[in-house]
Image: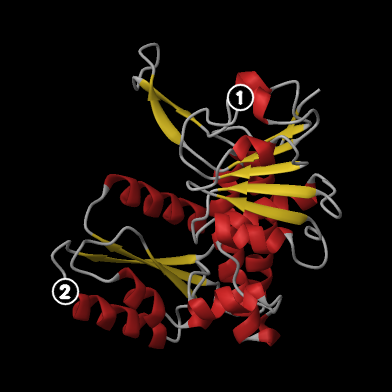
């Protein structure tokens, strides 16, 4: 029997809890958390993501600011916008939406963000603190995965976790977090990637598989053991003539193949995705608490 990990429902619960904390702030005569986003150009996926941030902030009572910049902006000009946000006293946290145009060095931009306002958790200082198990902003998707595992009381201590994909946004941080002391954590972790020979050798032994490849239906029934927990971070569009949009969203896991064999499974959509959005709000609230402990 496979149980679905309902990220959509849990994210809604988390937004409600965050909204209640914001109401407490307002009742004390204090300003609500303020999240800002920098959007360069008009990439469709980026615009959609930022628009979802606007709705999320409205739903919990956050203030939201959008800094929209042309795709032709220079690296120096973007760095100046980051500096302004770093120094803006009323902005608690901000994100620079990726990808950035080719004339801009992404690493320079990430490095320029004040770590105390880095609610994406991408700055090396936050990553390093996370690796050393110190308080830090955790990237939203790994943070969401941990929260799902904790909410559903999934045992990770002493378990074998296989992570498929080594991106700095998901794979690398979640591999560190699953091996950290405490719960969720205390598991033995193998990080696999495009140069790993026979990924199936590891995935068949895993108690927990976290996949973040973006390859539709990559993980099939024969690649997992009975009762494995599957966390599917991948999301891709595949053609579907029966759909009004002519496509449907699928994950890295072959859902039909593994359903009934896995013990827990995140659906796509409705699993990790909604949690990622909710955890960005959570990080923004944490930014307020860390900078102004007396606020809450």
**Which residue is at 60% across, 49% downward?**
275
Q: In the displayed structure, does residue 266 sit left or right of residue 141?
A: right
Q: Residue furthest left?
A: 72
- Picture coordinates of residue 84, whole percent (x, y): 32, 84
**Neighbourhood count class around disc 2 (C-alpha, 10 Å): few under 14, some 14–19, many 20 upward:** few
Do we see residue 15 in this rendering? no
* Figure check: 41 above or below 214: below
The span from disc 1 to disc 2 (Cα, nearest Å) is 44 Å
- Picture coordinates of residue 19, whole percent (x, y): 63, 59
Task: Give the residue pinned by disc 1.
Answer: 255
Task: Give the residue pinned by disc 2.
Answer: 74
Kindly state the secondary structure of the residue where label 1 is placed: helix
User: Is 49 in front, or is 180?
Assistant: 180
**Which residue is at 71% across, 34% downward?**
204
- Picture coordinates of residue 18, whole percent (x, y): 65, 61
User: Is 199 in front, or is 130?
Assistant: 199
Do the CB atoms of the residues marked 1 and 2 lie less than 8 Å apart?
Answer: no
**Which residue is at 63% across, 58% downward?**
174
**Which coloring applies here?**
secondary structure
């Amino acid at each position: 029997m496979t149980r679905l990990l309902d990220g959509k429902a849990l994210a809604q619960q988390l937004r409600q809890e965050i909204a209640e904390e914001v109401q407490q702030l307002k009742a004390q005569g204090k300003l609500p958390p303020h999240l800002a986003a920098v959007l360069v150009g008009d990439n469709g996926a980026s615009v959609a993501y930022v628009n979802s941030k606007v709705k999320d902030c409205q739903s919990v009572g956050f203030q939201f600011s959008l800094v929209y910049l042309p795709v032709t902006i220079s690296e120096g000009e973007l760095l100046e916008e980051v500096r302004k946000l770093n120094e803006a006293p009323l902005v608690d946290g901000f994100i620079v939406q990726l990808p950035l145009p080719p004339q801009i060095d992404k690493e320079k931009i990430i490095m320029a963000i004040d770590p105390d306002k880095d609610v994406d958790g991408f700055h090396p200082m936050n990553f390093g603190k996370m690796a050393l198990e110190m308080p830090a902003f955790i990237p939203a998707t790994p943070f969401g995965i941990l929260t799902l595992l904790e909410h559903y009381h999934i045992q990770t201590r002493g378990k074998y976790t296989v992570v498929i994909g080594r991106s700095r946004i998901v794979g690398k941080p979640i591999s560190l977090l699953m091996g950290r002391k405490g719960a969720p954590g205390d598991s033995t972790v193998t990080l696999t990637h495009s140069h790993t020979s026979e990924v199936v050798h590891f995935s068949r032994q895993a108690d927990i598989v976290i996949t973040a490849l973006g390859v539709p239906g990559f993980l099939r029934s024969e690649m997992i053991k009975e009762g494995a927990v599957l966390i599917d971070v991948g999301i891709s569009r595949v053609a579907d003539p029966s759909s009004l949009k002519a496509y449907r969203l699928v994950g890295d896991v072959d859902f039909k193949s593994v359903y009934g064999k896995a013990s827990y499974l995140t659906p796509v959509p409705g699993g990790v995705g909604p949690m990622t959005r909710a955890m960005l709000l959570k990080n923004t609230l944490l930014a307020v608490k860390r900078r102004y402990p007396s606020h809450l």
